[in-house]
Image: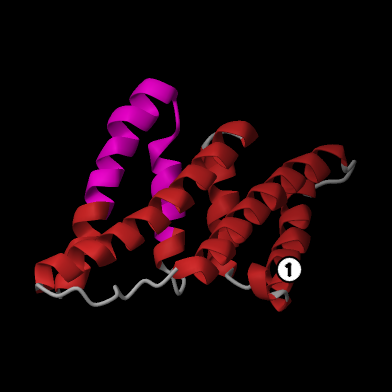
């Protein structure tokens, strides 16, 4: 329980910094950072979770870009819908590659792209910042959890 409290405290502080400094001072989209943090925390966390979450978030961003690009050049009715069907199949099929196997992270990256009105640069920056922030909050939270437990054992997070 104290490990969870430690992670909660560190994630809360980092999230506050993302809002107050990241977005207010540097224009980093805090809501996209939060989606990336959510993505990280729904993986197995650690190094493997960081790689999966980040790679899948960015692949989703690229898939979203391709949906808009391809549907815009197809000279057929319902081009957006047809493109979405094909791309979503590919988004799911990429999960055969281990570091792209986190399908929800892929959908999250695409959703962020659509949610920003197709701002590729802003989304990629925020996805990267959010995944790094989540990993840092997990590591620091594990250390804080150990302090709260009153022991010096190695934290749950090892990488």
Left-right relation of 96 to 138: right
Circle 1 residues within 10 Å: few <14, some 14–19, many ≥20: few
Seen as rendered, the residue at the extreme front is: 152
Q: Quadrant of residue 95?
A: bottom right
Query: Is the residue 99 above or below the residue 16 in the image?
Result: below
Query: Is the residue 55 above or below the residue 70 in the image?
Result: below
Number of marks present in the image shown: 1
- Where does the image place residue 136, in percent across and percent down from the top left? 38, 54
Q: Which is nearer the eye, 87 or 79?
A: 87
Name the quadrant of the C terminus.
bottom left
Q: Which residue is mark 1?
A: 89
Q: Which is nearer the eye, 50 or 113?
A: 50
- Where does the image place residue 41, in percent across and percent down from the top left? 39, 65
Residue drawn at 63 percent across, 58 percent down: 55
Left-right relation of 49 to 30: right
Residue drawn at 75 percent across, 66 percent down: 90
Write down the region rendered in magenta: 11-38
Seen as rendered, the residue at the extreme top is: 25
Q: Quadrant of residue 33?
A: top left
Seen as rendered, the residue at the extreme right is: 75
Name the quadrant of the N terminus.
bottom left
- Where does the image place residue 152, in percent across and percent down from the top left? 19, 73
Residue drawn at 28 percent across, 53 percent down: 11
Q: Main secondary structure of the magenta part?
A: helix
- Where does the image place residue 56, in percent across and percent down from the top left? 61, 60
Does the magenta run of residues contain 17? yes
Left-right relation of 116 to 55: left
What's the coloring here? secondary structure
Task: Name the element at disc 1.
Answer: helix
Residue drawn at 39 percent across, 38 percent down: 30
Q: Quadrant of residue 123?
A: top right
């Amino acid at each position: 329980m104290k490990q969870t409290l430690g992670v909660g405290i560190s994630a809360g502080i980092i999230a506050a910094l993302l809002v107050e400094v990241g977005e207010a001072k540097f224009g980093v989209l805090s809501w996209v950072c939060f989606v990336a943090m959510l993505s990280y925390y729904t993986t197995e966390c650690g190094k493997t979770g960081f790689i999966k979450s980040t790679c899948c978030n960015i692949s989703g961003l690229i898939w979203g870009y391709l949906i808009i690009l391809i549907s815009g050049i197809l000279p057929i009715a319902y081009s957006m819908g047809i493109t979405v069907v094909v791309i979503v199949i590919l988004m799911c099929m990429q999960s055969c590659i281990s570091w792209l196997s986190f399908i929800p992270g892929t959908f999250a990256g695409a959703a962020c792209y659509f949610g920003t009105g197709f701002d590729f640069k802003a989304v990629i920056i925020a996805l990267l910042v959010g995944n790094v922030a989540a990993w840092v909050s997990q590591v620091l939270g594990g250390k804080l959890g150990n302090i709260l437990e009153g022991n010096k054992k190695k934290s749950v997070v090892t990488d």
